[in-house]
Image (cartoon, helix red, strand yellow):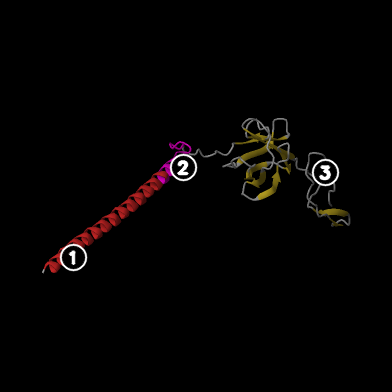
Amino acid sequence: MIETQAPSGFKLSDPIEITIAYDENGQLVVTKPEAWDGTIVNQQIIDLPITKINEAGEVLSGASFVLQNADGQVIQGPVTTDYEGKALFTALTQGTYYLVETQAPAGYELLKNPIKISIDYDTSGKLAVLSPDNWNGDVTNKKTETPTLPDSSEEPGSSSSSEESSSSSNGSGSSTSTSDSKEGSLLQTGDTTSSFYFALGIVLILSSFYLLEKKRR
C-alpha cells in the first residue's frame, strides 16, 4: 500500500507490504503486517527558511548552504540565497541538523562554524525549531576586512624630483668636465706652438752670427 498524498504538514508514509491469507479457521485475514490494526502513522514535517543578512541588516544574495544530519551527511542542498537573501530547506522531520555555509556572498567572510539546529515538538505538540533559541532564520555575515597599506613617509614626487636633481647634477658635472678638458687641450697646444717659434728664433739668430763671422774671415 502506497500513500500518494500526505496531509498538509506531514511526510508521506513508507509503503506498507500487506499479505492477506486464510487463517486456521479458513477466514481471510491480514497476516502481514502482523497484528496490523490498519493504523498508518505520518511524521510531522516543517520547512526551514533562512535569510542571509549583513551586520547592518541588509539582505545578501549569492550565499550557498547545505544541511547535514547528526552524522555529517548532506541531506539537502546546496541552496543559494536569492535577491531577497532567502533560501529554503524543506520537509524536515524531528532531529538535529547542521547548517553549513559553503559559499559566502562576494565581499563577506564565510561562516567559520556550522549552526546547530534542533527540531522537536513544542509544548503544543507541533514541530518547531527549538535551538538556537528564538530562531528567526537570520544568518549574519561579516564583511571581509581590507588590509591597511602602510603610509609612505616620502612625499609624492620627491623621488622623481630627486632623480631629476641627480640627473641635472650629473649633466652639469659632465658639461664642466668637458669644458675643462677642452680648455686644457687648448693651453697645451698653445704652449707647444710658443716653444717651437722660440727654438726657431734661436736657430736663426745663431745662423746669422755664423754667416757674419764667416764673411769677416
Q: Earlier in the sequence, mark 3 or mark 2?
A: 3
User: Along the horizontal axis of the image, is 92 left or right of 188?
Assistant: right
Number of on-image labels:
3
* Range shown magenta: 151-167
Q: Which quadrant is the C terminus positioned in?
A: bottom left
The image position of residue 103, as x and y in percent, is 64, 45
Q: Which residue is mark 2?
A: 160
Q: Give the camera-side residue of 210 and 25.
A: 210
User: Residue 130: horizontal and vertical position, in percent?
Assistant: 66, 34
Q: Going from the N terminus, do you reach mark 1 or mark 2 first?
A: 2
Q: Amino acid at mark 1?
A: Ser
Q: Residue at x 18, y 63 (%)?
A: 208
Instruction: Identify the residue under disc 1.
Output: 207
Q: Are dots 1 and 2 in contact, CB under 8 Å? A: no
Image height of 132 relative to 175, above or below: above
Instruction: Residue at 70% x, 41% y: name it.
Output: 81
Location of residue 51 (image quadrant):
top right
Membership of 164 in magenta stretch: yes
Question: Which numbered dot is residue 164?
Answer: none
Mark 3 vs mark 2, CA separation in Å: 79 Å
Secondary structure category for the residue under label 3: loop
Q: Indicate which label's residue lies in the foreground, 1 or 3.
A: 1
The residue carrying mark 3 is 6
Q: Is residue 217 above or below residue 40?
A: below
Residue at 69% in and 49% down: 75
Picture coordinates of residue 215, whole percent (x, y): 14, 68
